[in-house]
Amino acid sequence: MHFLIWLGFVIVAVYDARENRIPNVMLLGILIFSFIFKALSTSPLSLIMWSLIAGCVFFFAALALYFIRMMAPGDVKLLGVVGFELGWGNLLEATYWIAVFSVVIGLFYALARTTDLHHSSRELFSKYFMVFSYGPLAGKAISSTVNNKNSKLRMPFAPVVVIGLAMQQYF
């Protein structure tokens, strides 16, 4: 049963990395398998109650991050499911590992973006040099040719969560 839960998390992570969205059906499937796994334990009512509390804590903490535009809605739901799966006792460790790997993977995404923008930064430097050399009229002509790429760095969060969960389970 636990294998199916991990398989679901891996599928969600791959889907989010590829499509930048998390399917609700997969999250619901993970939640159902986790509920069944907890219901078959020795003290199911207590375990399910503490898992629900943990899921709500993770969900509402992620919802607060969503309201300040740091997280996508699918990530909020994913963290609610992760909280339910982990239960109350493992939230702090999981939060630590998710935070560590979000920094590590975020640095890799930033480095990859910097290498992609290296060529365009050289072009941008030459365009600003032309503005400096020829005055404001050159700036108007150049500004119409500059590509306005989205300046925000976006990275899928589900792979970070799954790696953090794996590290939390390993250590």
Image (cartoon, helix red, strand yellow):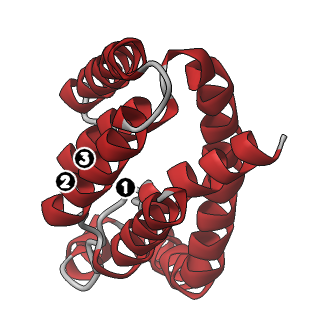
Residue at (22, 81) in percent of width and height? 141
Q: Nearer the viewer, residue 4 or 78?
A: 4
Residue at (64, 47) in percent of width and height? 164
Whichever of callouts 3 and 1 sits on the residue coming sooner in the sequence is: 3
* Quadrant in the picture for residue 149: bottom left
Alpha carbon separation for disc pair 3 and 1: 14 Å
Number of other residues with Cα within 10 Å of mark 1, as a class: few under 14, some 14 to 19, many 20 or more: few
Q: Secondary structure at mark 3?
A: loop
Q: Nearer the viewer, residue 112 or 20?
A: 20
Left or right placement of residue 51 versus residue 98 in this view = left
Q: Which residue is mark 1?
A: 152
* Mark toward the viewer: 1 or 2: 2
Question: Residue 171 at what x, y percent from top left?
Answer: 84, 40
Asked whether disc 3 touches disc 1, contact meaning CB atoms under 8 Å apart, the reply is no
Left or right placement of residue 77 versus residue 95 in this view = left
Question: Residue 13 at what x, y percent from top left?
Answer: 44, 67
